[in-house]
Amino acid sequence: MKIIMELQDITKQYREKIVLENTSFSIYANQVVALVGKNGSGKSTLLKIIGGLVKPDSGVVHKYIQPLKIGYVPEVTPSHILFTPEEYLTHMGNIRGMAKGQIQQRIDNLIETFNLQDARKTRIEHFSKGMKQKVAIMQAMLEETDLLILDEPLSGLDPISQSDLEGILLILKERGLSVVLTCHETKLLENIVDRVLLIKDHQVIQTSSLQGSVNKGNRFIFAIATETSLEELLPFIEIQQERHLNSGVNEIEATVNQEDTDKILLELLKRGASIKQLIPIHRVEEGFYNHF
Ligand SMILES: Nc1ncnc2c1ncn2[C@@H]1O[C@H](COP(=O)(O)OP(=O)(O)OP(=O)(O)O)[C@@H](O)[C@H]1O
């Protein structure tokens, strides 16, 4: 799986209030990631750090695509816009310095994808909340986008608009986009979310995939630094995912029985690996739904 962004040892605080403390995780191409956590846990702050709108106090954000084109949609969408979507998006394209032909082509594409053909000539101020949300996302995607960041995209939408938007996000994902979003209406996103990241106690905790299979054992991420090939190093466990990070660390995701983890760690040490971190991947039921 292709990694597009790695956040390493991120810390962020506002005055004395610590929001994120020394936390690390990665974002992969073509995945929809849901960021969950209690109110005030730091979801919006983390989205802004991913989007480059807020700088962490310490830690590094590595981008693995250059340039990584990011579209950011804030939680509050402007509502009293006197323009039609076409006029509004044209202005936005001009402000960004896009070429005229490119703007028109992109607007036509977006209006079709977001199914707003019938509202093309209607002023945005007369739109429903769901339609305004669509315009906000279209605005963020006016230029080619690799990673779309959405802060509470379903918030305040009626069930029909929510499932409409969910369908559009699924289409965007099928076209290769990566999405990171926050949401409270978690059940609604079951169809599209690949991975859930939970913010708890200033840390980002990885949980297993929503659509993934039920695990026999417990899944762990072993973060190790080693010169030896991983197959050679770990012939005795089945590696589900393997990631090579800029920091020189290899992350291995594997399902192992809890009681075997000490044995595996010992074997790794014996084979000369330096273990940087062992991260349990919480099951969906524990890590996701129970936090609401
Ligand atoms: N610009 C800021 N200045 C000071 N404190 C801030 C700022 N932005 C956020 N905070 C504080 O940081 C903490 C995390 O805020 P954040 O908005 O990231 O949380 P959240 O998980 O998105 O919350 P919610 O679910 O309520 O939207 C909160 O205590 C918030 O009050």
Image (cartoon, grey):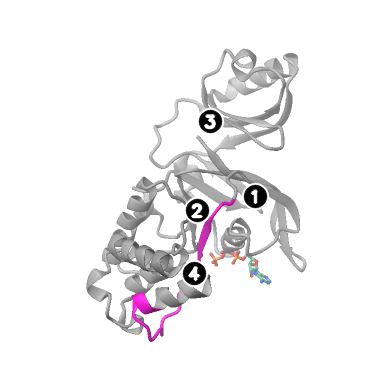
Is residue 248 left or right of 205 when viewed as pictured?
Answer: right
Position in image of residue 37 (x %, y %):
54, 56
Identify whether 36 is placed above or below 107: above
Where does label 3 land, which residue?
219
How much space separates mark 1 and mark 2, taking CA atoms? 22 Å
Of pointers 1 and 2, the one earlier in the residue sequence: 2
Would you say the residues marked 1 and 2 are in contact, meaning their CB atoms lie under 8 Å apart? no
Does label 1 or label 4 sit earlier along the sequence?
4
Ranked by sequence position, the earlier of labels 3 and 1 is 1
Residue 46 visible within the image? yes
Answer with mark 4 or mark 2, whichever residue precedes in sequence. 4
Disc 4 within 8 angstroms of ligand 1 (CB) = yes
Residue 108, compared with residue 220, is above or below; it is below
**Contact between labelled residues 2 and 4, with CB atoms less than 8 Å apart:** no
Q: Which residues are magenta?
A: 67-87
Residue at numbered disc 4: 75
Of marks 4 and 2, the one in the foreground: 2
Q: Residues within 10 Å of mark 2 (few under 14, many from 20)?
A: many
Q: Amino acid at mark 2?
A: Leu
Marks 4, 3: nearer the viewer: 4
Q: Secondary structure at mark 3?
A: strand
Question: Residue drawn 41% across and 47% down?
Answer: 193
Q: Which mark is residue 203?
A: 1
Q: CA distance from mark 2 to mark 3?
A: 27 Å
Q: Quick check: is 99 in the magenta stretch?
A: no
Tag 2 residue:
147
Mark closest to the chain's N terminus, 2 or 3 = 2
Q: Residues within 10 Å of mark 3 (few under 14, many from 20)?
A: many
